[in-house]
DNA sequence: GAAAAAACTGTACCAACTGTACAGGAGGCG
DNA sequence: CGCCTCCTGTACAGTTGGTACAGTTTTTTC
């Protein structure tokens, strides 16, 4: 019962790299089995069809993605008490991490599945939607925390602002690939950081005088 | 010589819709020819192979894309003399146009091709890169115009800022699809608009007192 | 250590799709 | 009439996704 999961994990690992490099449709099962060293029967023992592979792939990706954000923003919150400070630090840490990835960000599976929305795999689309809503929840909570302390320079919905983070991440990944410039993504995260800082800074920290001087 | 181009255009139109809906790999030639009412031989008369279809598709898409931006920001420049005012108006017009699209933005072919970067079609990747650089040029020029009049609240590279526009557009398209919410993209454009306004407004228009009060 | 369950292999096969090759036909044009 | 553009028709080859199923090896469990 453990050996099987190990093989399954190996297939998923190989598949993720291939899908991010070439897209889901362009990744053949044949290719995956030769690289993992199993047979086609073996593959279909683990996954009923290619759609199930897509689902498993997405779920795995989202799990890792969540873990990463938990870690980065968790660390940021340890290093900075102030919620705005912590968020800005988190963005910087994320930017640095992305800048240090050799060859740039490998790509986002959520985006891949968005582009490859075949009519039949509704389930994949639903997983995708939940992933996006999850990002929204995560960042919305951070902005609500920030807004409890800082008054934004312009009124803004924390949910929209949360989506802006995901939007710039996804867009940054696409643009980095289009431009063939791995630096573009981390750069854009820093632009976002500037915007957020500009939105909440500016001597408008009137709601909590105790936080004055922290920025 | 006209009949041929008409058929070719019809193929491209059908193909674009299919590719945006399902991805390039998931779009079969068989499907395209039944929908356009020609034969497979007819298809291969117009396109040597599927790669050439991809190239033609991208080129057509980019042309239309450019025309759209020319029109929108051209109109915005007619309606507002001030470069910042014009840019902000352009973003608003674009947001409204995107909000009025039934079913939301159909998707960006540049993003599709980014995801589908098979090793063999280098040419497609290059077209893609040129498209991204073209967006950069377009928006960079606008920001340089703005910066000639307005001092940004924080120092920022106009090129990076230009990429932010493309980044939010591409990311917005992806997130709209992931969330299954067509409103997300136009909403995010308005967030970007707020950010840009915040960056240049704020009584910092000191370089040109003549523009005071215009915003 | 044997039985049972899990994790595969091997083989054979089908349908769909990309792509090749090539012969030929319809229609406009000089 | 002949030439060119724009196709149609047919046949065929290779790859891939997927099914079916019998059999084998490995691992776990009692």
Image (cartoon, coloured by chain):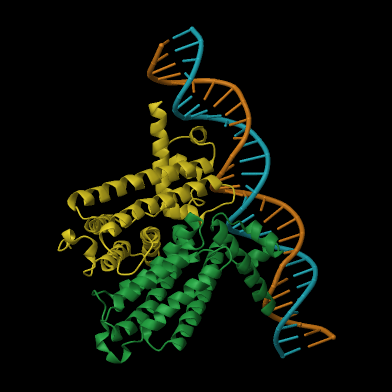
Chain colours: A green, B yellow, C orange, D cyan
Residue B59 position within the rendered picture, expressed as x and y whole percent measured from the top left: 43, 43
Residue lying at 43% horizontally and 65% vertically, measured from the top left: A170
Report if residue A47 is visible in the image: yes
Question: In the figure, residue A208 lies in which quadrant?
Answer: bottom left
Q: How many marks?
A: 0
**Residue depicted at x 40% and y 80%:** A87
Residue A120 visible in rendering: no
Q: Position of residue A177 (x, y in %)?
A: 50, 58
- A62 above or below C24? below
Along the horizontal axis of the image, is A89 left or right of A4?
left
Looking at the image, the residue that sits furthest to the left is B213
Quarter occupied by residue B161: bottom left
The residue shown at (31%, 71%) is A160
Picture quarter with the N terminus of chain A: bottom right
State the residue in front, A28 or D30: A28
Which quadrant, please, contains the C terminus of chain A? bottom left
Q: Where is residue C15 drawn, in percent x and y?
A: 57, 48
B74 sits to left or right of A126: left
In the rendered view, tell whether residue A25 sits above or below residue A144.
Answer: above
């Amino acid at each position: 019962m453990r050996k099987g999961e190990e093989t399954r994990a190996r297939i998923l690992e190989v598949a993720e790299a291939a899908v991010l490099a070439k897209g889901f449709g362009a990744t053949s099962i044949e290719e995956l089995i030769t690289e993992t060293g199993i047979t086609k029967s073996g593959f279909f023992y683990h996954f009923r069809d290619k759609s199930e592979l897509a689902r498993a792939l997405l779920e795995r990706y989202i799990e890792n993605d969540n873990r990463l954000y938990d870690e980065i923003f968790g660390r940021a919150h340890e290093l900075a008490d102030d919620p705005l400070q912590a968020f800005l630090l988190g963005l910087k840490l994320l930017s640095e991490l992305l800048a240090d990835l050799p060859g740039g960000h490998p790509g986002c599976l959520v985006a891949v599945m968005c582009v490859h929305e075949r009519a039949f795999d509704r389930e994949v689309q639903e997983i995708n939607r939940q992933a996006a809503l999850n990002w929204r929840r995560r960042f919305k909570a951070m902005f609500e925390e920030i807004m409890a302390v800082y008054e934004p320079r312009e009124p803004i919905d924390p949910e929209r602002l949360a989506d802006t983070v995901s939007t710039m991440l996804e867009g940054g990944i696409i643009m980095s690939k289009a431009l063939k410039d791995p630096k573009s993504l981390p750069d854009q995260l820093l632009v976002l950081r500037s915007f957020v800082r500009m939105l909440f800074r500016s001597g408008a920290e009137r709601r909590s005088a105790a936080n004055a001087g922290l920025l």
